[in-house]
Image (spheres, rainbow, N blue to C red):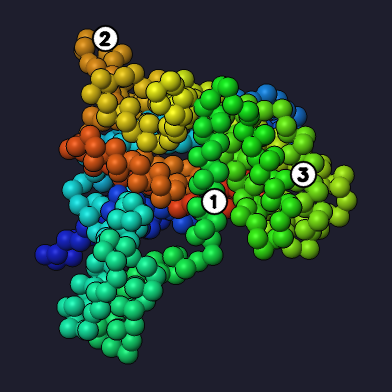
Amino acid sequence: MKLHCTLQNYTAEIFHIPLFTADICPGLFVTPAFSQVFPLLETDVQHVQLQYNTAHKVKGDKASFTSLSEIECQYLPKALQVTFKRLACCFHALLSEGSGEDLWRMLKASLSQEALASGSFSSQPIHLQNLVFGKHKECLMAVNRRLVEAATSEKLPVNLAGKPGRVTAEQIDTTLSLFKGNYAAIESHLDTLQVAMATSQALKHQDTSRHDNLLSTEKNLVQLVGDDSSAGGLSHILTLLKGQLQLPANQRSHSLDDVLMVLMFLYSLSGGDCGDEELEVQDQLVEAILAEKSDLPPVIHSIVGDAVSGSIVRDLLEDVWSKLEAVGTARDDLKNFQSILEPSTAISPASMKPLLKTIVEQIFSPDKPELVDLEFKSSGLKDFLKSGFGLFMNVSKPRPSDHPLLLVFVVGGVTATEVKQVRDVVDKMKLDKQVVIGSTKLLRGTDVLQSVFCQNNVDPDAVM
């Protein structure tokens, strides 16, 4: 919106730009106002149908759906429609100052490629950049280097003792202590000190070893699922679960929430084909939940509540499994991006093909493969001609890589690892393009569990 007001010899030009984004670092932003928005799954189909038919019962308007692909925006609950329209309007207002836009979408994810006005993303904070884009060791080295440089610039007595190439929490804390009481120095280097303190706390946190254990388990599952001659992934999880239950609670490497997280990773990785041990895994989980009902981890407790009988817990776990299966089939409608697994061969082990990374690689591939899973959103005669349907013009089909800036927006959240993988692709391909990642939130592992198993994504205002 532009408003021109003329008073005597003065003219004011007012621009309306919605403040709905929060910049984390250059190339990454989130939208906190929409942090609870999460893509619907196949398990939500019946819920949407029930909501719609109940709301339109008086009019006699009745709908019936067999899959998520049949549900259009008009069939969603009003509150959810308003949420999606607000998000779309915010982006439209934010990008309307650009010189033009091409839009693509892929199922529940949205890809938006823009030629924005110069400088639109230049004011983002940079002190978190290493934490998001750097490898673990490189990140620690960068944080420590900036901290030492800050202390040196204030002429503080820095102690550089320690093993070269290794940074510990104690080493960071020692340098941080030099700033104690020096308020002028603290004010001058506040961003560096905050990042250093956060890094130290993360290194000392009890979840650090837990994350290492989860990463190891996920690597094992990748090899099992990628090797046809191996036992199924559920067999591995069943063995893991039995072993954990034999240990005292304070000695276990995986909590029940961790087991649920690994299960969701397995179903997404395998497309739902995980093995024949589902009932055995459920039996073990029921036993574990009943045994630990007074001290359950947060997500499992949100799912089962105060259920005390095995039959109730089992019914609740059946609902969990239906959602796991829905996660496993979420990419079934895709053609090029259906699998996120590269199977093992005689000369190489199985490996992951992260979805976001693969999409960006295909977009910028010199071979220009057809992006059949990305739907170009035409909105006028110009777009009609660009799409290659002009009667008198021979124009190539537009691609997201045609413009100097690619903006990828992910509904439901994105992890720092995914963002780093995209940055690595851009650096490896030496692109002369700018790639910006946006999402509704920056995810932790438990956030995905909460969104899939504990949150009512059809009716966000409802309490489950």
Residue 276 makes an appearance in the image? yes
Q: Where is residue 424 in the image (x, y as percent from the top left)?
A: 29, 41
> The residue under label 3 is which amino acid type?
Gln
Mark 2 Cα-neighbour bin, 10 Å: few <14, some 14–19, many ≥20: few
Residue 86: give its label. Answer: none
Q: Distance between the residues labelled 2 and 3?
A: 64 Å
Observer-nearest of 445 and 369: 445
Query: Toward which corner of the image does residue 337 lie, by quadrant?
Result: top left
Residue at the far left in the pictured view: 9
Q: Which mark is residue 213?
A: 1
Say what amino acid the circle numbered 1 marks.
Asn
Q: Do the residues labelled 1 and 2 touch (CB within 8 Å)?
A: no
Query: Which residue does the image show at 81% across and 48% down from the upper left?
Result: 287
Comparing 214 with 358, the one in front is: 214
* Residue under numbered circle 3: 284
Residue occupying image coordinates x 66% and y 44%? 240
Q: Name the residue under label 2.
A: 391
Q: Is residue 217 placed above or below 119 in the rendered structure?
A: above
Which residue is found at the position 66% from the left and 34% from the top?
Answer: 234
Judge left or right: residue 95 versus residue 39.
left
Nearer to me, 190 or 114:
190
Q: Which of marks 1 and 2 is nearer the N terminus?
A: 1
Report, in whole angstroms, how far the alpha carbon at label 1 lies from the one at label 2.
60 Å
Task: Kindly state the secondary structure of the residue where label 1 is placed.
Answer: helix
Residues packed near mark 3 inside 10 Å, few (<14), some (14 to 19) or many (20 plus): some
| Relative image position of residue 39 (x, y in whole percent) | 55, 40
Q: Counting residues from the N terminus, which is met first, the one under dot 1 or under dot 3?
A: 1
Tell me the CA gap for discs 1 and 3: 20 Å
